[in-house]
Image: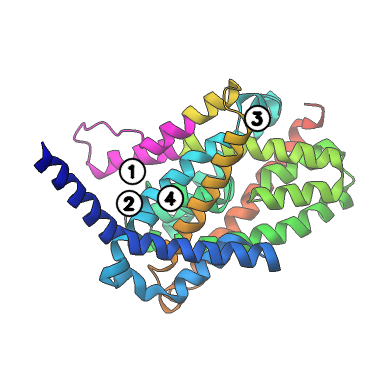
Amino acid sequence: METVVVHERFQAIDWARRKGVGLLTVGVLALAASFLSEHYGGPQLLYALLFGMALNYLSETPATREGIDLASTTVLRAGVAMLGARITLAQVASTGWRTAALVVFAVASTILFGAWLGRRLQGSTAVGVLAGGAVAICGVSAALALASVLPKDERVQRFTLLSVVGITVLSTLCMVVYPMLVVSLGVDAQTAGIFLGATIHDVAQVVGAGYMVSSQTGDTATLVKLLRVALLLPVVAIVSMCFRLQAVEGRGIMATVPWFLLVFAGLVVIGSADILPAVVVTGLSHASRWCLVAAIAALGTKTSIQKLSQLGWRPVALLVANTLFLAGVVGGGLWMLGISAR
């Protein structure tokens, strides 16, 4: 018995030795990114990415390689799983069925459009799905979640990193332009909130854009955005199964739902039942953010600016085209359905 205990201790020490340095490294990068964001402004995830890219040699250094790999996979998935603590079924239901139907249609059509365009511009359906999903659902978080279940291909990895920069820029641009657009068109506060919540990429920019217009617009935009975030679970599950079934070439092997999506769904259900104390929900939300920041830093170390620049104009065009497509679908849907009355 003592021999088994000693062996397990040695295994734990060996695991910590192999993984610990890399995990500590990305943790320091996450802290640095958070410090800059809190004290000087700017997007936390973008800082983490840039710090990681500046130290890209660490992903090939034996002392840090395994820890960085762990951060870019397991830590990433844990961060996505804990996103479920931010969403309840009541929040989703409060948006109304017509709004929900429009959002679901807009998300699905944007992902399909992204897959089609990605195949033509990049020669990769996976890259197109990543672009469409990131734009359609919740920006960087969706890009990371989708990247974790897509085929491990160099183009997908590079595009994931580019999408962090591209989506941050596009989301900020939309936060400035879209409120001016809805005000100039003279739409009511509710319709404006639906449009902003259904089209802007990241949650923070949705909130900022909505409350630039009015309190009612901000509240509506936030709820609609939460509905989009809630679609992360089914979308990632479907994408995962589709690509896994494709990978086994129709040999009848069932694709399984990744564990982190099951945790995501469980947290949504538990949160909807109002079982968890508010402090726990807040803690899970913060932990999710930290995991995603650390994962982005780890992913940043796996590429270089030189390699990223080799992607050319096509990935940028892919993100911009998906953004414009989503805005067109949502705007057209609002005009056709007269959804302001819900």
Q: CA distance from mark 4 to mark 1?
A: 19 Å
Residue projecting furthest to the bottom: 306
Q: Residues within 10 Å of mark 4 (few under 14, many from 20)?
A: many
Q: Is residue 246 above or below residue 172?
A: above
Q: Which x, y percent locates residue 223?
A: 70, 35
Q: Residues within 10 Å of mark 1 (few under 14, many from 20)?
A: some
Q: Nearer the viewer, mark 4 or mark 3?
A: 4
Residue closer to the observer: 328 or 91 = 91
Name the amino acid, label 4.
Leu
Q: CA distance from mark 4 to mark 3?
A: 28 Å
State if disc 3 and disc 4 touch (CB < 8 Å).
no
Q: Which x, y percent locates residue 263?
A: 44, 33
Mark 4 or mark 1, earlier in chain: 4
Helix, strand or loop at label 3? It is helix
Residue 328 covered by magenta stretch: no
Q: Residue beneath label 4, please? A: 76
**Stretch in magenta:** 236-265
Q: CA distance from mark 1 to mark 3?
A: 27 Å
Helix, strand or loop at label 4? It is helix
Name the amino acid, label 1.
Phe
Q: Which x, y percent locates residue 279?
A: 62, 35
* The label number, if any, that marks residue 83 in the structure image: none
Q: Residue at x 29, y 72 (%)?
A: 61
Mark 2 or mark 3, earlier in chain: 3
Q: Residue at x 55, y 67 (%)?
A: 32
* The label number, if any, that marks residue 243 in the structure image: 1
- Lateral position of residue 137 relative to residue 337, left or right: left
State if disc 2 and disc 1 touch (CB < 8 Å).
yes
Residue 255 covered by magenta stretch: yes
User: In this view of the protein, can residue 317 be seen by the observer?
Assistant: no
Q: Which x, y percent locates residue 11?
A: 19, 50
Q: Residue beneath label 2, please? A: 151
